[in-house]
Amino acid sequence: ATPTALMAGIGRGAQLGILIKGPDALESSRRIDTVVLDKTGTVTTGRMTVTGCHPAAGRTRGDLLWFAGAVEAGSEHAIAAAVVAAARAEVAELPEAGGFTALPGLGARGIVDGRDVLVGSARLFGERGIAVTGETAARVEAAHTAAAVPVLVAVDGEVAGMVEVRDVVKPSAAEAVHALRARGLRTVLLTGDHENAARAVAGETGIDEVRAGVLPADKAREIEEMRAAGARVAMVGDGVNDGPALATADLGMAMARGSDIALRSADVVLVRDDLRVVPDAIHLADRTLRVIR
Ligand code: ADP
Ligand code: MG
């Protein structure tokens, strides 16, 4: 009866848009009690847009977008795509950046027109000891409070301004979280983003807990800590950054539009970009396993 139950579970999943990756995929998943959701691209659409452009004193809007766009053209991050789109719309021609370096969970760096250009979060600037002052500091604070992402730009170590980027919560997110909580599952939002942005998204969707400011390399460790404390964890993610966390969770679920690495690390792939299948997937995994054992 065991293989039959498993095949039935896999078949039922396929109908719902839930791809269970073979018999071994569910082997490590025990009854789930905690669902960890990545923020960007999972709970939010990940389709970001630039909502403000704030050059520092002595800089123009065009300058700011020219430097930021050139560096971000080398990045795969959804934030970078938004900055590049805004730059292309306003700047005649973007130069090619040299020596591009991605700084996962923080930003990016490159050489533009012989200048050393750094783009990224307030945390990145704090770590590099680049002082953000005056009008720019006020804009950064306002962006954090409004749950927007401030992308700071420095040219040769001097702040050139800030580009504000925003993302929206997926229409299916609140309903999915409600269904998870109705099943008695604890929900946790895990993100590298700022605490305020994370809190705003958690508030909008009803997610119980927030773990913000977690760098990509530390996401798996957060999951490990929850498991060590006795939780049985399902992780839902999409990004390159989520691969190790998906592999560490008892049940790793990747959104199908996510990165190859996320898809490879997951036990379950969600075909549709609709979070409402998450509770179905957990229920299905649980039921299939219970029949098997
Ligand atoms: P999440 O965990 O929500 O998917 P990430 O870990 O990918 O977010 O990124 C965390 C933060 O790092 C972002 O909110 C942003 O402030 C900053 N960041 C990362 N990559 C970039 C980039 N290419 N350009 C600007 N900022 C970035
Ligand atoms: Mg993400």
Image (spheres, grey):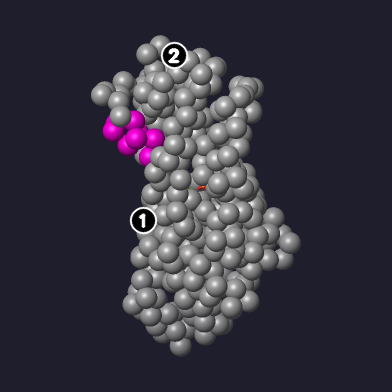
Q: Do we see residue 211 in this rendering?
A: yes
Residue plotted at (60% across, 73% down):
181
Q: Is residue 85 magenta?
A: yes
Instruction: Determine which quarter of the picture holds residue 32.
Output: bottom right
* Residue placed furthest toward the bottom: 1
Name the spot of residue 218 as percent of width and height, x first: 62, 45
Against 182, residue 53 (above or below) is above
Residue plotted at (26% across, 24% down):
92
Against 15, residue 251 (above or below) is above
Residue plotted at (63% across, 47% down):
195
Amino acid at dot 1: Arg
Residue marked by disc 2:
115
**Front residue of 6 and 132:** 132
**Front residue of 148 and 235:** 148
Element marked by disc 2? strand
* Residue placed furthest toward the right: 229
- Alpha carbon separation for disc pair 2 and 1: 36 Å
Against 150, residue 27 (above or below) is below
Amino acid at dot 2: Arg
Q: Do we see residue 259 in this rendering?
A: no
Q: Is residue 159 magenta?
A: no
Residue marked by disc 1:
257
Instruction: Determine which quarter of the picture holds residue 16.
Output: bottom left
Q: Are marks 2 and 1 in contact (CB under 8 Å)?
A: no
- Other-residue count near label 2 (Cα within 10 Å), few / some / many at <14 / 14–19 / ≥20: some
Element marked by disc 1? loop
Name the spot of residue 159 as percent of width and height, x first: 53, 21
Residues shaded magenta: 82-89
Name the spot of residue 105 as percent of width and height, x first: 54, 39
The tag earlier along the polypeptide, 2 or 1, is 2
